[in-house]
Image (spheres, rainbow, N blue to C red):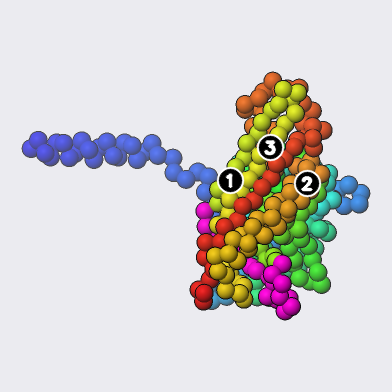
Amino acid sequence: MKFDMKFKSHLLLIALVSICLTGCWDREYLKDLHLAYCAAIDYTENGEIKETIELIIPPDIEQKATKNEIHSSFGPTVRNASNQLRNKVRGNIRFIKYGFELMGRTTAERGLYPILDVNYRDPSNPTSNVRLIITEGEAAEILEQKKVGELKIGEFIKQKIDSLEEMSIFPKETADTVFRSLMDPGHDFALPYLGRDEGDIITKGVALFHDQNYSGMLNPDQSIMMVLLMGQQGKNARFTKKLDLGHSDDIRNFITINVGSKKIKRQFKVSVSADESIDVNLGLELQAVVEEFTDVLDEKELKKVNQDLSDLLTKEAKTVVNEIQKANCDIFGVGRKLIAYHHNIWSNKNWSEDYRKVKFHTKVDVKIVSTGILQ
């Protein structure tokens, strides 16, 4: 009897709670939506915003594949251009959380904040996994290709960005991390930089930013060194270098190493002198796996190759840091260290001018830990 009363009371409680449940009041049906894989933002000659998107159209029947459509609209602001787009297509538009946003270089030179601000005002717009990409020409031209081979343009670019991040050519930046850098006076960022060559979408390197504006670029080889100096790495990070080994057959003087598959030690120390000058010790200890080399290395030759590679990569690292400083891009967050540990010094600095005066002491040490599977 006691058990029955207890069971009935539980049923009554469940019934009362169920009455209070409101249900899914904010649900949206997939059939009523248009999914946007990617967007492109450009400025027109008369100063208007041009927004171009790739929409993924579901098939009428299961056996058919999805299709993509490219649509563009114009407006004085990003929000207005988006509203014009919604007027053109049936149903609402929702951006895929693993998508990306392209921006033409001229747009990036004018500043990213007005473009990105609306994404953070709208909670329905994803940011944490959305990649931002700079293009050499008009961003819309890339989307208007519609396909690369059998792949829709959005799928192709996503696969390209993912693979180049794994190769340590692009840093792993998202709309979320970029917006946080925009709010941080002591840290800048770099974004993938793509171009077109006779219909092919090619990697130009990375676009460097000071504050919110495009300020320079690095080529793909320099980009790998920058990513390593930032303390990031993908699954691979390859360098092909010519050594002075005295071979008449030129191909035997080249070596290809991979430093991304092993642990990297990084040194990053910011020091302030009595005269308030700033020194940065930036160093890397790389463990290299030889992926292509025609010679067998004995202990003496191995020591020489290690030293030669260290000298070559140190020289390249110094060149990369010099280019980054010329672009006034505090990609390493020197200003962030000053804010945290030397705030009085930071308060006396005009960082837009004083960052270029920072003295970097850059060094790369290479040690070959594997010479390949044949020898």
* Circles 3 and 1: CB atoms closer than 8 Å: no
Q: Residue 8 — which label?
A: none
Q: Residue furthest top?
A: 344
Q: Residue at x 73, y 53 (%)?
A: 315
Distance between the alpha carbons at the discs numbered 3 and 1: 13 Å
User: Furthest residue to the front?
Assistant: 300
Q: CA distance from mark 3 to mark 2?
A: 13 Å
* Residue under numbered circle 2: 322
Residue type at the position of mark 2: Asn
**Residue stretch rendered in magenta on the structure:** 244-263
Give the mark, 2 or 1, whose residue is nearer the N terminus.
Answer: 1
Q: Position of residue 107 (x, y in %)?
A: 82, 49
The residue labelled by disc 1 is 266
First-in-chain label (3 vs 1): 1
Task: Mark 3 or mark 2: name the one nearer the start of the chain.
Answer: 3
Q: Which mark is residue 280?
A: 3
Tell me where residue 307 sits by quadrant.
Answer: bottom right
Point out the residue furthest to the right here.
46
Confirm whether the magenta stretch covers residue 251. yes
Question: Badge 2: few (under 14), some or many (20 or more) residues near its Cα, within 10 Å?
Answer: some
How many C-alpha atoms fall within 10 Å of the one at disc 3: few (<14), some, or many (≥20)?
some
Residue 203 position in % (x across, y down): 73, 63
Relative vertical location of residue 253 with respect to residue 235 in this rendering, above or below: below
Examine the rendered structure and indicate whether residue 277 appears above or below residue 122. Answer: above
